[in-house]
Image: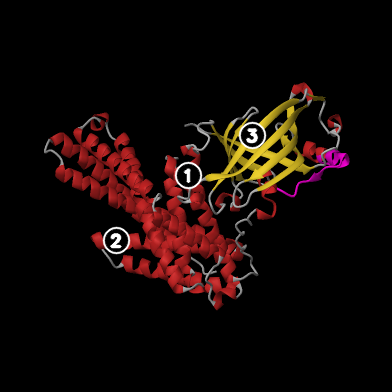
Amino acid sequence: MSTQEFVETERKYDVDIETPLPAFEDIAGVEQVADPADHQLEAVYFDTEGLILAKHRITLRRRTGGADSGWHVKLPAEQDSRVEIHAPLGQPETVPEDLAEKLLVFTRGDELRPVARIHTRRTLHRLHGSEDVTLADFVDDHVTAETLHPAQLERQWREWEIELVHGDEALWESAENILSQAGATRSGHASKLARAFGTAWPPAVPAPPKARPKGSAGDAVVAYLAAQIAEITAQDPGVRQGADDAVHRMRSATRRLRSALSAYGRLFDAEAAAHLKTELKWLATVLGKARDAEVLRDRIGELLNDQPDALLSSPAATKITDELEAAYNSGYREALRSVGTERYFRLLDELEKFRDEPPTRPRADKKARRVTAKLAGKAIKRLRRSQKAAARQTGVEHDTALHQVRKDAKRLRHAAEALRDVHRKPAVKLARDAQELQKILGEHQDSVVARSVLLRIAGDAEGSPENKAALGRLLAAEEQRATDSEARYERVAKKNRLNPL
């Protein structure tokens, strides 16, 4: 079932039942008002038993009547704006699968059920500017609402809404003055559903603390953790629906969380931090199977495209591409299974609890600059130790040691990223320097993995001269890539000072 996505930008106003309509022509830029259009709208709102969507200020409804009958999901965006996703009407009690998947990261398997019914008698006034451009839609709504869960309540009210179409902020501000003069006041409720629930409307999920140069170390780290948890939440629907880069971005967020918990774990209860790191490692591993196969597929595909045309049609090339495609598909299927498990949903619950009620130790209450600088310094020392260890190794052991350098560089990069709002430019530079090392050694590690795959396929390949020649050219090209990336690493490592914060 197809869905459509829009950004809705509107303001709501409370108004008395008998209040006359405002003078629309007095709004700046409005030159003409279309004839009013009347609509009867019936909407049923859905949520879980615990009103989890409401707590995240998300609404899910099935509405009939008007020009946009169907299922609607509204997600918070910037001030006065919401992302609105539409799906066809379908069945009254069955949430469309596409919408249910987008919300699964919040509902986590809990059943969606009707929680309210709202009838709206709407009169639409379309406001036009020059050349008949639609600037905004003004609606006059008479609302009758009935809540079904957790308590049965009935309410009636009248409200005005003005939604920007092609108008700008100046029109909005002018409209604000005109509507205020007519007797309207900005609504104290973000949605009709919130007003229908009244005092039964649940409090929103609390906002995480902000990182500040003079704030606490705990707040700085929790703010970074919160941003990564939000990224996992944002990428979840894309992972389920096969969106480009969604698996990679979710995996990156899990790695950032693990890095921050490793670098700054001493600020929190050790057992709680260790448990989250274990579960995040599981999720990163699951996502990594698809992501690593995708990277390898694209990498070797690039090599194939750089070779003579005869290679592309050889049995060896076909075997390589088929195997890598199968590995990606297998990894992606496992990722899909994993994000539908109780273990994954439990991890999301635990991450949010850690964010909202961080199990801090006394050290977390101290000023962020000194405490975090010391802990980040440990990550620098860890990286330098692994660099020295790699310099002493040769052959396969050297490749393994360089991979450890890469992992330690990534850990340092994420540790520094967490401190951008605390240490500002020094943290930005440290993160950039660590990322440069990580990126170069990532290229080297990709080459190590690609060569191992090519060598294995060469061992399994038919003994034809064409196949062996084709695989030989690919291996030679990949070995040159590894040599080049290691040389770049040596140059960068010499000039990269990794200055402490």
- Give the quadrant of residue 15: top right
Amino acid type, residue under disc 1 in the picture: Pro
Q: Is residue 416 above or below residue 295?
A: below
Q: Give the Cα separation between the discs numbered 1 and 2.
A: 35 Å
- Which comes sooner in the sequence, label 2 or label 3? 3
Q: Secondary structure at mark 2?
A: helix
The answer to whether residue 72 is left or right of residue 454 is right
Q: Is residue 42 above or below residue 489?
A: above
Q: Are marks 3 and 1 in contact (CB under 8 Å)?
A: no
- Residue 126 seen in the figure: yes
Q: Position of residue 17 (x, y in %)?
A: 82, 39
Label 3 to label 1, Cα distance in Å? 28 Å
Residue 476: quarter of image: top left
Judged left or right of residue 467, residue 112 is right
Q: Is residue 185 magenta?
A: yes
Of residue 14 and residue 465, the one placed in the foreground of this image is 14
Mark 1 — residue?
A: 237
- Mark 2 — residue? 400
Question: Magenta stretch: residue 84 in it?
Answer: no
Q: Which residue is mark 3?
A: 42
Who is closer to the viewer here, 33 or 229? Answer: 33
Tell me which corner region of the image, top left, top right, bottom left or bottom right, holds residue 279. bottom left
Relative to 434, is 186 on the left or the right?
right
Q: Magenta segment, which residues?
A: 176-189
